[in-house]
Image (tube, rainbow, N blue to C red):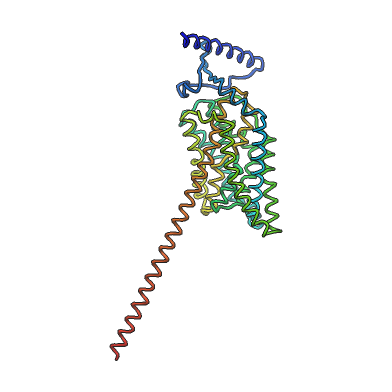
Amino acid sequence: MNNAADNKLLSLRGKLYLSLRTIIDIKQERKPIYKSYNPAMEDPRMFQIIQNTSKGKIYSINETLINETISSTSQSPLKIAADFSVKITLILVMLGMGNTVEIKILIGHLKRPIGIAIGMLSQFVVLPAVTFGLAHALQLPPIPALGMLVIGCCPGGTTTNVFSYWTDGDVALSISMTAVSTVLAMGMLPLNLLIYSRSWTDEPLIIPYVNILISFGLTLGPALLGIFIRWKFPKVADVLVKVGSVAGALAILLLLTLLSIQYPFMYHSTWRIYIGTLILPFAGFLFGYLVALLLRQDHVRCRTIALETGIQNFPLCMSLLTLTYTNDVFAEISLFPLLYGVTCILCSLVFLGIYRLAERMKQYRKYKKSSGTDISEDKAVSSALKIKSDDAEIRL
């Protein structure tokens, strides 16, 4: 009886919600947000599916999820402190990474922007197409699929630069690509969303241009200051590079911890979302590396472009979703980007581990080969001396 009563109450509440939503949409002359939705794709423990039989449309509502999202996105003291801490550490990271760059190398990239152009090709042409195809391959519902598409169309993130430094990449190229991709995102982000989002929605998304400019300033400002310090004060620059590297590790720990504390509901995502968030970073690494390799770039640049393609600007994606959607939709559409913020860092650490392991194996092979050469040379010398001694004995 209790279950029947609960279902009846849920149905009434659902009809009331849909009626109010229809009135609001009519008054604002808005089109339906989502074209199709299959409730079998979602975990029934997570979403309560309510169907409006008169219109044949299905919406998903989860009050607990909505309430958690509202509390997480509100300007609480924890969120303010978290945003401040992350921004400070990212400024230190970019300052430190700027100290690794020499002006001559940076000017060389700007005069011949081949690496930058390849990075932008991977970032704004290849990755959005791969994201679109992956969302369809996983058969994600419209709302999570849109969240996945937005993160795939965003520019590269600041974390790219520190991972490029840790993997012995071209940091000057990485900083250049991050700055250029952030500027190009003002045009390429809405263009890609216009092209690919039609599978799931007809509603335009709001592009956070102010946040893009802030991201550009936080990336380029400290980096340029670091480049200047490297030019004028090399000894100070060596110290700041170490500070930036430590700040990068601290920023990663902060992001993982704060995301888990502020948005714990993201870990209740469906298995499709988990698989998508794990595949997307590695797909970015793979396609970024392959595109650079096919265009005859060296392995250092290939690694740098791969990282730039695989690591997206997660805060910019969250700003876009916050500006575009109400809390009830944001609760579900933010699941993929939030979980991606965690898995992207973990996948980048795996990328770093693979590179370090490959370098150690390479060094070991070189050492073994050089040791073998030394042994063979010693044998050759000893045999030559023996032959000479035998000749001397024969002559005697």
Question: Closer to the camera, 275 or 196?
Answer: 275
Q: Furthest-bottom residue in view?
A: 396
Residue at (35% x, 77% y) in the render: 382
Residue 67's x, y, as percent? 59, 23
Q: In which quarter of the image is residue 29?
A: top right
Q: Quick check: 334 left or right of 240? A: left
Residue 6's x, y, as percent? 50, 11
Quarter occupied by the C terminus: bottom left
Question: Closer to the camera, 249 or 38?
Answer: 249
Q: In which quarter of the image is residue 322?
A: top right
Where is 46 relative to 395, above or below?
above
Residue 286's x, y, as percent? 49, 44
Where is 393 relative to 344, above or below?
below
| Count of numbered labels shown in the rendering | 0
Where is 207 relative to 232, above or below?
above
Question: Closer to the camera, 63 or 191?
Answer: 63
Q: Quick check: 65 left or right of 391? A: right
Q: Quick check: 311 left or right of 27? A: left
Residue at (30% x, 90% y) in the render: 395
Question: Closer to the camera, 277 or 194?
Answer: 277
Residue 228's x, y, as percent? 70, 54
